[in-house]
Image: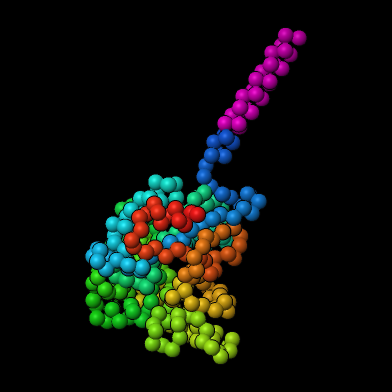
Amino acid sequence: MINKMKTFCTVIFVSVLYCVILGVLFDNISTVPVFSPDSEGESIPLPIIMYHSVIKDESRSGMYVITPDTLKKDIEYLHANGYTFISASELIDYAENGGVMPKKPVMLTFDDGFYNNYGYVKPLLEKCDAKAVISVVGSYTDEFSESNIANLSYGYLRWSDIYDLFLSPRIDVGNHSYNFHSMDNGRKGAGRNYGETDEEYKNIFYEDTKKAQDRFMEKTGFSPIIYTYPFGEYDEISTDVLKEMGFKMSLTCTEGINYIKPYSESLFLLKRYNRPSGIGSEEFFEKISE
């Protein structure tokens, strides 16, 4: 009888201890700032910030130009306020395959392919533990690769620079068109011209996009899976073309927060906030959070 009581007490003690351990584990797990596909399809809010040129000369700062110091302060502010920088590759993997994401993800993007993105932005990303998408205009890169000009104040990336960006674990390279980023080609961005049929527009959009993709592959051995619309102009038919070409994501200039779910096709026509000069990091990001 005594032995049975000892056995019974031992079982009770082990069971209680097991429950306590499980409780501690689950309590700790619940405090980890991640979402998983088991969270009943809960959407994750994702702000994407749109930068352009980064120049030290403060007198040139404006709507689309900031200084390296402003970018550094932005990154430091986001770190201090619990945001986690995610790459486009990580976002695509989450949307396609599920998994986990930080509770407060944020994405940085840089448009047009300025050489200062290589000279100032890339070192800052490495130093400050951040990630970004840098989107390149193919015709600009052809021009500056031929002249081999590398100027932080006005130049654009060369193919050799872009090859280095593809190799960086902190940078995803985007296709910003081959020649839609021009006001002299008879259209605004990648939008559809008045009177163009679906088929005419599809062919024009496809040919420009393919030309850029071919140049990326020819010159670097890589091709982007991210498309960034020049001037934010697009026709929704272009999404079908991009999907057929193997793209996984597209970026617009429409302002707003994106809401991302796992196992979804929610990565096309993503919204972004343009980052101008003349406003501090705290004020800018508080404005976005509102």
The residue depicted at 24 percent of the width and 73 percent of the height is 150
By secondary structure, the bulk of the magenta-drawn segment is best described as: helix
Q: Which quadrant of the figure contains the N terminus?
A: top right
The residue lying furthest to the top in this view is: 2
Q: Nearer the viewer, residue 283 or 241?
A: 283
Residue 37 left/right relative to 47: right
Residue 118 left/right relative to 232: left
Residue 239 lies, with reference to residue 81, above or below; the image says below
Question: Total label count?
Answer: 0
The residue depicted at 59 percent of the width and 29 percent of the height is 21
The residue depicted at 52 percent of the width and 42 percent of the height is 32
Q: Is residue 166 shown to the viewer in this render?
A: no
The answer to whether residue 141 is magenta is: no
Task: Give the percent coordinates (x, y) of residue 289.
Answer: 48, 54
Residue 59 left/right relative to 93: left
From which residue to which does the magenta span run? Answer: 1-24
Q: Is residue 228 shown to the viewer in this render?
A: yes
Task: Give the percent coordinates (x, y) of residue 270.
Answer: 52, 66
The answer to whether residue 4 is magenta is: yes
Q: Nearer the viewer, residue 17 or 143?
A: 143
Which quadrant of the structure image shows residue 13? top right
Q: Nearer the viewer, residue 179 or 167?
A: 179
Residue 40 left/right relative to 27: right
